[in-house]
Image (cartoon, rainbow, N blue to C red):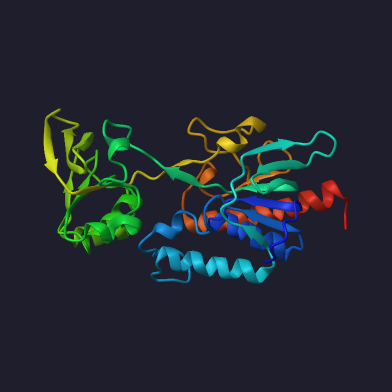
Amino acid sequence: MTDEIDLNWELIVIGGGPAGMTAAMYGARYGLKTMLLESRVLGGAQATSPGIENYPGFNFIVGMDLANKMKEQLKKCGAEYKEITEVKSIKILEDSGDFALETRRGEYIAKAIVIATGGGHRKLGVPGEDEFTGRGVSFCATCDGPLFRGKTLAVIGGGNTAVTEALYLSELAGKVYVIHRRDALRAEKAVQDMLFRTDAEIVWDHIVKEFHGEQLISDILIENVKSGETRTLEIDGVFVALGSDPESKLVKPLEVKMNKRGEIFADGEQKTNVPGLFAAGDVVDGMKQIVVAAGQGAVAADSAYKYIRKEKTGPR
């Protein structure tokens, strides 16, 4: 990488998770002048996972380790990247059909874009959640779990995210509750079986109604969804693990087609309804898995290459 800022590119990838890094790798390998822009640091949501067991080639790998391996590959393949570079807006240039991306570094120009912005932590939206975020309420077990060693914790959710976080926290905490609104978990059977072998207590058929405390969180009010009965559960920390909501606001002004949740519709070639705009990863309507995101990133880069070389400059 160099310190010079070149603002003109063939392919710009927005987002530095597995989908974005894979798209940038393939774009560079295809010979496209490729830049990846990431608003934070490279890695994406996978970097916060305490353990990944379903990515081919690894029986088990810590999320940050997998992210770092992808980052090393990205460096070697020749793609440029800028971290801590948020894309504030995108517009289509009328004269060329290229894209102009506004950032604090200047206005980048690209012939094609892969949007791989992933998703943000999904919130419960109940009283006290925002107030106690950072004061006992967290959305990342690997980030904040060590702060609660030996404490009593609650994990909210029943999918892969929640169960994986509960497994990690069960190694640190004195007591872990898993609060799930249904009578069966939605996580993969393999991780469910691992959870059942721990001392974690699953509170079935309950939802969280309120977060309570003074300076720090001290308890939560939970409700049985079948009986309507409520009770207070004393805890030292809560980890909200409900998955993510797509980070797709950036492309809404371009009238990209999305579902009601804001997930982008992309076809089998990762094309959106906007020519030259491709999408991959958790921001796309479909299965949320690292291996899927990486595959979509590769397909998106391939489609972008065909779009740039054939539609923009003619056959090679």
Left/right placement of residue 310 relative to residue 283 reads right
- Give above or below for 31 relative to 300: below
Left/right placement of residue 141 relative to residue 270 reads left
Residue 172 in the image: state x and y as whole percent.
22, 62
Left/right placement of residue 297 relative to residue 97 reads left
Residue 303 in the image: state x and y as whole percent.
71, 51
Residue 89 picture quarter: top right
Taking the spot 46% from the left edge, 64% from the top edge, the residue there is 55
Tally of numbered discs: 0
Residue 33 in the image: state x and y as whole percent.
76, 59
- Give above or below for 193 relative to 210: below
Taking the spot 26% from the left edge, 55% from the top edge, the residue there is 166
Quadrant location of the C terminus in the rendered image: bottom right
Quadrant location of the N terminus in the rendered image: bottom right
Taking the spot 26% from the left edge, 34% from the top edge, the residue there is 128
The residue at the far top in this view is 228
Residue 178 in the image: state x and y as whole percent.
22, 48
Q: Is residue 193 visible?
A: no
Query: Which is more toward the observer, 193 or 312?
Result: 312
Q: Is residue 290 visible?
A: yes
Taking the spot 17% from the left edge, 35% from the top edge, the residue there is 221
Query: Which is more toward the observer, 262 or 71?
Result: 71
